[in-house]
Image (spheres, rainbow, N blue to C red):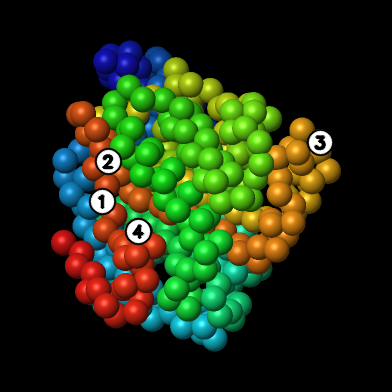
């Protein structure tokens, strides 16, 4: 109704709430001089709304590219060996997506961070182009997706370079996996994405506490916003034609939260049927953020500094699925090994992983 042509001529103008990029409407003095009303504040938002909810055909297309990308991630796990270069795993992924799935392009620059490199959220850019050698017994964080007919997959797997998790690696990994599982189980129309982010923070802190990396009470940690030290990014984002798709903020949607960590959310919307979201909780032992936290009394009291420093080279764990919100829950497109046991079995050749 808001695009009724009788109301005037609609021009495309608006600001991308994710990138901040402004799209300006073309100058059309002849339109106004001809007596037409020019409307610049409706079309952009209408397009954002239409892209934030996927049609059945779009869902099937995104399911396909996620399936191809899932199989490519499995091939990366099977290929990984200590001493390889990070970019070699990127190459394995890109080759499989194109050779097996016809995905000629990637929607974003691959992130392959081994060891401490995994603690940097967007490692892999031109300044650090996945150029490190993969150490023995290191976690390898691979955030990679294929693109098909303009639609993106965005999947992250984390696994041990040696094929076997250490005890400490497994503790951190399972804390993130627990958060990932609980969020997906709770997703349905009407649920606040901010609430899901908060849930993930609470579960991860609980896992770190149980594993001896933290001390104290989880609710007190939450009140002090300790979660942002270990997960300094949002839980996930809208996915579609852009990796970070439009429609996150603006119009009458909830505004960006102000507290640390949550302020990195690319949307705080209430979930609706047809939305495709990434679910990507993470936990990182980032030297810079931990050093800052050690110097703050309200945070330092929760940190087992000796254990954290002994494991500082662990890097990071992120687990990311691509998930569509359904009428009464959600459905993940992503089909990769997730449990410690399955990852180790696939990497050892004991389990033939099937992507359907």
Residue under pointer 1: 333
Q: Are marks 1 and 3 in contact (CB under 8 Å)?
A: no
Distance from Cα at disc 3 to Cα at disc 2: 41 Å
Residue under pointer 2: 324
- Mark 1, mark 3: which one is toward the viewer? 3
Which numbered marker is on residue 297? 3
Q: Quadrant of residue 30?
A: top left
Inspect this view and state whether residue 119 appears: yes
Q: Are marks 3 and 4 in contact (CB under 8 Å)?
A: no
- Mark 3, mark 2: which one is toward the viewer? 3
Closer to the chain start, of discs 3 and 4, is: 3
At label 3, counting other C-alpha atoms closer than 10 Å, the crowd grade (few under 14, some 14-19, many 20 or more) is: few
Q: Are marks 2 and 1 in contact (CB under 8 Å)?
A: yes
Distance from Cα at disc 3 to Cα at disc 4: 36 Å
**Picture coordinates of residue 31, whole percent (x, y):** 41, 24
Residue under pointer 4: 338
Position of the C terminus by quadrant = bottom left
**Picture coordinates of residue 65, whole percent (x, y):** 26, 59
At x 70%, y 40%, the residue is 302
Distance from Cα at disc 1 to Cα at disc 4: 14 Å
Q: Quadrant of residue 347?
A: bottom left
Q: Vertical placement of 86 versus 22: above or below? A: below
Position of the N terminus by quadrant = top left
At label 1, counting other C-alpha atoms closer than 10 Å, the crowd grade (few under 14, some 14-19, many 20 or more) is: many
Distance from Cα at disc 1 to Cα at disc 3: 43 Å
At x 38%, y 57%, the residue is 155
At x 79%, y 46%, the residue is 294
Closer to the chain start, of discs 3 and 2, is: 3
Inspect this view and state whether residue 20 appears: no
């Amino acid at each position: 109704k808001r695009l009724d042509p009788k109301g005037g001529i609609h021009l495309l103008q608006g600001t991308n709430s994710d990138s901040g990029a402004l799209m300006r409407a073309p100058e059309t003095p002849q339109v106004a001089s001809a007596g037409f009303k020019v409307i610049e504040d409706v079309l952009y938002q209408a397009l954002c709304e239409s892209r934030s909810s996927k049609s059945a055909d779009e869902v099937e297309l995104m399911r396909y590219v996620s399936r191809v990308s899932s199989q490519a991630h499995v091939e990366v796990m099977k290929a990984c060996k200590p001493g390889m270069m990070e970019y070699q795993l990127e190459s394995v992924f890109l080759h499989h997506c194109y050779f097996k799935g016809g995905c000629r392009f990637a929607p974003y620059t691959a992130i392959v961070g081994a060891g401490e490199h995994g603690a940097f959220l967007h490692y892999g850019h031109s300044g650090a182009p996945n150029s490190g050698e993969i150490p023995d017994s290191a976690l390898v964080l691979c955030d990679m997706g294929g693109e098909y007919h303009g639609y993106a997959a965005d999947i992250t797997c984390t696994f041990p370079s040696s094929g076997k998790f250490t005890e400490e690696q497994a503790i951190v990994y399972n804390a993130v996996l627990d958060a990932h599982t609980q969020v997906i189980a709770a997703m349905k129309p009407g649920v606040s994405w901010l609430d899901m982010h908060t849930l993930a923070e609470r579960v991860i802190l609980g896992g770190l506490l149980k594993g001896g990396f933290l001390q104290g009470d989880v609710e007190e940690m939450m009140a002090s916003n300790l979660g942002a030290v270990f997960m300094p990014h949002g839980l996930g984002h809208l996915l579609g034609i852009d990796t970070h798709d439009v429609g996150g903020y603006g119009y009458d949607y909830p505004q960006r939260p102000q507290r640390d960590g949550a302020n990195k959310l690319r949307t705080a919307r209430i979930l609706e049927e047809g939305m495709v979201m990434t679910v990507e909780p993470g936990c990182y032992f980032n030297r810079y953020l931990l050093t800052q936290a050690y110097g703050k009394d309200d945070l330092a009291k929760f940190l087992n500094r000796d254990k954290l420093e002994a494991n500082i080279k662990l890097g990071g764990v992120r687990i990311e699925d691509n998930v569509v919100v359904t009428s009464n829950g959600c459905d993940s497109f992503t089909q990769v090994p997730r449990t410690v046991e399955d990852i180790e079995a696939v990497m050892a050749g004991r389990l033939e992983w099937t992507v359907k």
